[in-house]
Amino acid sequence: MSMPSTVGGGRSDLPTNPNNERIELDKTGDEGNPHPDYDHLTPAERCYMEQKHKIDMQKMAKVANKSHRDRIQDFNQYLANLSEHYDIPKVGPS
């Protein structure tokens, strides 16, 4: 059993053209499809995933623009606007 010889000691699994020159595969994927892992999805699923990705990116950009101080101020304002249903009502002759 002899192993097939490769010219130049390189990989033999790369495709070659008729002139026996190796062709490097493009590893970036299709330029028109930003998510090559969506190829197996239906058009509706692909549209949903792309829209979800777009919304997630917008949310992350919005959060990234706020400083810690701004987030704390917003949270304190949210807490101040809550109803006080959790307070113990005054009952009795105190």
Image: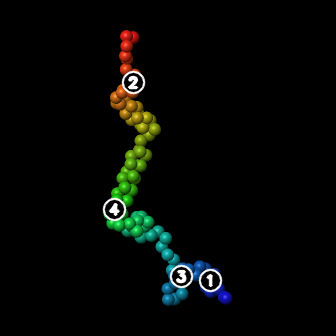
Image depth: mark 1 or mark 4 in front:
4
The CA distance from mark 2 to mark 3 is 76 Å
Residue at mark 3: 22
SS class of the residue under badge 4?
helix
The crowding category of the residue bearing disc 3, from other C-alpha atoms within 10 Å (few below 14, some 14 to 19, many at least 20), is some
SS class of the residue under badge 1?
helix
Residue at point 47%, 68% (across, down): 28
* Nearer the observer, 34 or 46: 46
- What colour scheme has been applied to the protein in the rendered image? rainbow
Tell me whether the residue at label 2 lies in contact with that at label 1, contact meaning CB atoms closer than 8 angstroms: no
Rendering coords of residue 61 (x, y %): 40, 49
Q: Is residue 20 left or right of residue 84?
A: right
Q: Between disc 2 and disc 3, whose residue precedes?
A: 3
Q: Which mark is residue 47?
A: 4
The amino acid type found where label 1 is placed reads Gly
Residue at mark 2: 87
The amino acid type found where label 2 is placed reads Asp
